[in-house]
Amino acid sequence: MSEARVTVYRRMKDLPSTHLLGTGTPMCAGCGGLEALHEIYDLIGEKSVFINAAGCMTLLSVYPFTPFRGSWLYTAMASAPAGAQGVRDALDMLIHKQRLPESEDMEVVVLTGDGAAYGMGLSATSGAMERDLDFLYICYDNEGYGNTGQQYSGATPHAAKTATSMGPRGFPGFKKDLFSIWAAHKPAYVATVIGSEPLDLARKIETARNLKGPRLIIALAPCPTGWDYDPQQTVEIGKLAVKSGVWPLKEYVNGEVIHTKVPKQRVPVEEYLKLQGRFVHLFEPQRNDALLTEIQTKVDRYWEGITQAE
């Protein structure tokens, strides 16, 4: 863990007190992705260009308006990193030709869901990292193709029921490790965050903004419609994702992986699972102890490895 971190965000009162992102959007009530985006945008500010791949967050913008105070560009699902390249190159050329003052430069931000980040856009993202593109990539990870009915994606967790994994055991596969895939490219920065832990999120955005090159923020995005729970439980579910160890809060910087919040006493994973309808088959009509034990054991082994390493 990083205990001696120097940061301006030491307490909740240090966080921005007003939201920059406009209200009244058609996003779902209780959207965990929107919760995280509100916090992130407050920290990034208006001098930014968001390149938004097709997905849930596309609903934020209804032509000709967007809730962003800065600029916003829509792309196809797999094309956001390529769009970011074009925007970054254009800004660099304008600055080089002195048609844009350096003080007016903007942060280039890719905004995608897990469908693009873990799957359809991964090739374009890998290419952008190989070119050392200076961009911030934000993935709101609601663990499925939420905008089209919650089909499973590369981010769907084991045993979750989705529109395309409706069997008695749910999704048979396992969530892809996007954090490690990015880290293998040796980018400037990779971090996991969640909106229900705003101080941790703010510190990571602060770190990312002080770096140049490819930077990834993966925000777990509890999804009331896709995960089947009451929207008012979004923050509670987010906190349980961290307390149970299902969603490790960590960062990759300078070639090192650091866990920024290690739960001292992890709660059982089932405390997180039982609040979500996508896992109800693990408890009803009969409790599936074998599958619950399998999920718990996988989480335990992860943290055992972290404890031994540190």
Image (cartoon, rainbow, N blue to C red):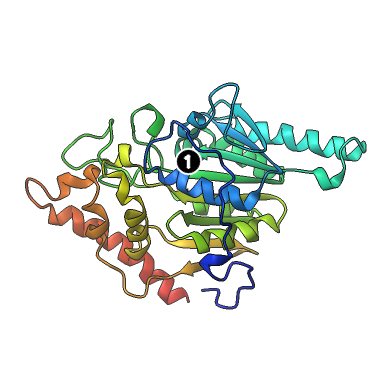
Please tell me in which quadrant of the rendered image residue 196 appears.
Answer: bottom left
Horizontally, residue 189 falls left or right of residue 226, namely right
Mark 1 neighbour density, 10 Å: few (under 14) some (14–19) many (20 or more) = many
Q: Residue furthest left?
A: 285
In the shown orientation, is residue 151 left or right of residue 99?
left
Q: How far across and how far down the image is residue 204, in percent?
A: 58, 60
For residue 86, above or below residue 135:
above
> For this rendering, which residue is in front, 70 or 117?
70
Residue sticking out furthest to the top: 63
The amino acid type found where label 1 is placed reads: Tyr
- Residue at image x 16%, y 49%? 282
Q: Which residue is mark 1?
A: 118
Number of residue marks: 1
- Residue at image x 85%, y 35%? 93
| Image x and y of residue 9, in percent | 59, 67
- Above or below residue 227? Residue 266 is below
Residue at the spot 39% in from the left edge and 58% down from the top edge: 247
